[in-house]
Image (cartoon, rainbow, N blue to C red):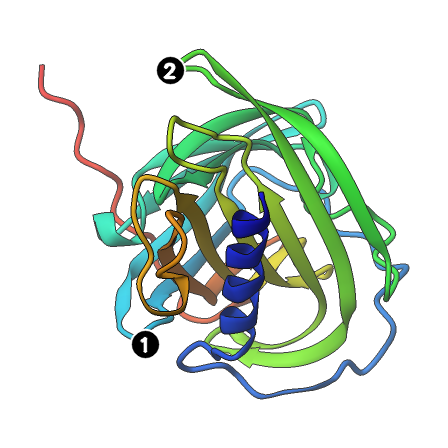
Amino acid sequence: MARIAFSLFLLSMLAGCITPVGSPPSVPASRSLAGVSPPTPRVGDTAVYVVRNAYNGEPRGDIQYRVDKVEGDRAIVGVTTTSPYAGLPHTEIDAPFGNWLRRPLATHNQPVEYDFTPAFPAYPFPLDAGKSWSTRVNAVNPQANRRNSVRVDGQVLGYERITVPAGSFDVVVIRRNVYGGDFEAFLQETHVVETDWYSPELGRSVRLETNSSWIDSSRGGGGMLAFSSNQLMRGDWNVYELVSYDVNGKRGGPVASVPPPPPPPR
């Protein structure tokens, strides 16, 4: 346990010294966003993001989110991409205030879709500066019929105004540390770090940075970790920036649809 704790400490220190390629400049937000509630999702609401590899700044492709259906307090969101490197087509389900009922989560660097009960607490309103939370949710992968206990530690870091390809926005900056509960043999659970620049006006992120890591105890470490049998493994490090949107009557950027995936062969 001491070796694992040291490995996690070293990884956090290394992560704190790295800045993603292309980080946008920011200034203080023009107003407090604590009391701002997001709009109610509507069928047809669409947002397109460019996905970049934060290690080198190269684009991976575009990803589009479109509200296909609203059922009571749930929004059914179709997700399509221009490239498999930006993600695979899938369906997400959002609860009120944008919290997640179905969403992929990195599992040892593989995206796995989970149904969350209760909803994954991405945005526990009100989003007061300095607010923090730690919550466990049940995560079920319907295909594998596997249940994980996922821990979400979140904090509102403050308010900023940032500029992304779709425009300039007042945002709530949120940091989430997610522990996936996906232990497998020699693999420790995946630790996902998400930094979210969330616009209450649009009810969605305008910028999102995600990276993941885990420990593989079957591999020997090198260098400073030569004494340990635990190897720190690093997954994808992606940055999503809003390129265009058509949300609740508000539009910005060149709203263009990502081509849908081809129909399955008959």
Q: CA distance from mark 2 to mark 1?
A: 34 Å
For numbered disc 2, what is the local secondary structure?
A: loop
Determine whether 11 is above or below 88 in the image. below
Reply above or below: 229 against 16.
above
Q: Position of residue 127 (x, y in %)?
A: 83, 57
Labels 2 and 1: the sequence-earlier one? 1
What amino acid is at disc 2?
A: Gln
Circle 2 crowding by C-alpha within 10 Å: few under 14, some 14–19, many from 20: few
Q: Which residue is mark 1?
A: 57
What is the x, y in percent for residue 51? 36, 62
Pick out the residue farthest to the front. 227
Q: Between 227 and 10, which is closer to the camera in this rendering?
A: 227
Residue 52's place in the image compared with 65, above or below, is below
Image coordinates for residue 135, horizontal then vertical, percent? 76, 37
Give the left or right position of residue 162, taking residue 36 as reference. Answer: left
Q: Residue furthest top?
A: 145
Residue placed most toward the observer, 211 or 116? 211
Instruction: Give the percent coordinates (x, y) of residue 67.
Output: 52, 39
Q: Residue at x 34, y 72 (%)?
A: 55
Give 28 or 43, whichever is nearer the viewer: 28
State which quadrant residue 217 falls in.
top left
- Of the pair 18 and 71, the residue shown nearer to us: 18
Q: Residues within 10 Å of mark 1 (few under 14, many from 20)?
A: some
Helix, strand or loop at label 1? It is loop
Q: Amino acid at mark 1?
A: Gly
